[in-house]
Each structure stands twice: as C-alpha cells, then as structure tokens.
Amino acid sequence: MMTTQTPSKLFSGLSAFPLTPTDAAGHLQADVLCRFLENIQAAGANSIGLLGSTGGYAYLTRETRQRAVRVAVECVGAKIPIIVGVGALRTDEAEMLARDAKAARADGLLLAPMSYAPLTDEEVFQHFAAVATAGELPLCIYNNPSTTKFTFSDDLIARLARLPNVAAVKMPLPANGNFAGEMERLRAMTPDGLAIGYSGDWGAADALLAGCDAWYSVVAGLLPAPALALTRAAQAGNRPEVLRINEAFQPLWDLFRAFGSFRVMYVMVDVLGLARIEPPRPILALPRETYGRVEAALQSLKS
C-alpha cells in the first residue's frame, strides 16, 4: 500500500539516498538493500530516494531497477515514502521507468536530464513533459550539473514547475553560498507549493538553516540518525546544535569532496560491517589506505 502525502510534503525534510547493492554481474542483492532501507525507515527519515546518483541508477539495467523498486516497496513501502530515480538517455526509456515505478507503487519520481550530446533547454523541457505525463506521480526536477553537465536556468525551472505533476526541484549548492537569495528568487518565479531542496551534503546545514524544504542526503543512506538529528535541529531553529553536528560530520564531508561521496559510501559499508559490495565498473573501489580515514571520520560522529 502506497503512503499518501501531498506533493509538497513528499519532498520535504530528510530524504535518504541509499546505495543499490549489486554483485559483480549487476544483479541486485535484495537482502542487503532491504537492510539499508529498514535502517532508514527505523531512524525516522521523511523519505527514501531510491535509484538516485548514490543508487548508481545510470549503471543499472531496467530489470535491476524494476526489481529494486519492487523490493523497496515490499520492504518498507507502507512505512515511508519512496521516491524513485527514473533518469535515462532516451525519453521513451525514462517514460517506461516512470511507468514501472508507478506500477510498483512508488510515491514519487526524480528525473535528471541524462545525455551524451549536450541538451538544449527545449529538449530538456520536452523530455520532462513526456516523463511527468507518463509517470502520473509527483516529480522532482533533478538539477545535478556535476554529473549531467546540464545546468537548469531559473527560467527553465519556472517553466517546468508549471507542468502537471512537477512538484519539486533538487538543487546543487549555489556557487556563492546564498541559499536564501536563490530560494527567494525561485519562489518568486514558480507556483506556490514547489518544494525546493538541496543536495551536496557538506552544504546541508546552511541550506536547512536558510529554510529549504528538503535535504537530499547521501550520508543518510547509511547514517540516517545523525543526518536526521541535523535536519531536526535546523527545522527547530537550533543553530548551535546544527553547527555542532555539522562539525562532527566535517571529516566525512572532506572525504566526500576529495574522493566523491559515491565511492566513499562503498568504503563506509565495508567499515560499518554492513556488507561486502563494490561500485559498478568502471568505477573502482578506493584504495585500502583510505579506510583509516573513513574509520576516523565515522568515529568523530560517535564522540
């Protein structure tokens, strides 16, 4: 049974993005995924961001992605909303993935404009319009230029926000650090109720304190409890507590920036003793000498 939430509520608070554990052949390790998801749900996160960038969606077949959504819904679907990434190179494939997610009883969709040839604004608009219509679920615009190499203009976000089913936008950290100014500008251009959230874990404290609707969190995929504590402190306006928790996270943020959060998360799984999984090739596991730094970073969250 699907959770029932308004679109703005769906894309709010802490959204935790887990890895998608697969074997060397790309087959889903369903039991490991279920453990990740149960940990997130038990901690009290607001939603799960399944098959996002942290979930390695771009490296998975349609069949693996379908199974991941089915497993997630069976495991925790009645207890926590599930937002599914449906990005694909071709529009017709993304439409199929959106229909798959709806058929599996997901709650919402997350769409990034994947491409090989650089896309124009009109191509992205038409792509989103088609997928939003096909999926028939609340959809979040995924503005992730570090991976897609496409940056949404304010005007394009405003245009997309008027499409049926488009309910949220997931933004990268602003280069100038002015979260409040960016949100004020976007809210003035978009319909009431568009949820504005941020990814980039090392900027989450500032984004939350500035009043964003959601933190789309990598680290919460494995460490939901401290991520939720940071989120709740910010929502309560407790700046000293936010800064204290964020300082404890700082060694991990440094590793995320140095090596990429995707790679570091695989080391964390090993260090935490949760599973033995490796990133999908061609992504390589980090060298063993990084493990000590990850262990120290995790220890700082316990002190």
Image (tube, rainbow, N blue to C red):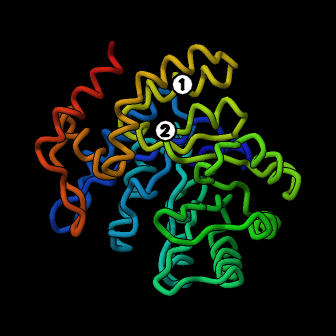
Mark 1 secondary-structure assignment: helix
> Which of the two discs, 1 and 2, labels the residue nearer the N terminus?
2
Q: Residues within 10 Å of mark 1 (few under 14, many from 20)?
A: many
- Residue at x 18%, y 54% (from the top left corner): 285
x and y percent of residue 97 in the render?
50, 72
Q: Which residue is under mark 1?
A: 230
| Quarter of the image with the C terminus in it | top left
Q: Residues within 10 Å of mark 2 (few under 14, many from 20)?
A: some
x and y percent of residue 93 in the render?
49, 81
- Residue at x 48%, y 29% (from the top left corner): 227
Please give left or right for residue 289 compared with residue 63 in the image: left
Residue reaching furthest to the left: 288
- In this rendering, which labeled residue sits more in front, label 1 or label 2? 2
- Residue at x 73%, y 48% (from the top left corner): 195
- Residue at x 65%, y 15% (from the top left corner): 238
In the picture, residue 150 is in which quadrant?
bottom right
Q: What is the CA distance from the residue labelled 1 to the residue labelled 2?
A: 12 Å
Residue reaching furthest to the front: 176
In the picture, residue 203 is in which quadrant?
top right
Is the residue 159 above or below the residue 104 in the image? below
- The amino acid beneath tag 2 is Trp
Q: Which residue is under mark 2?
A: 202
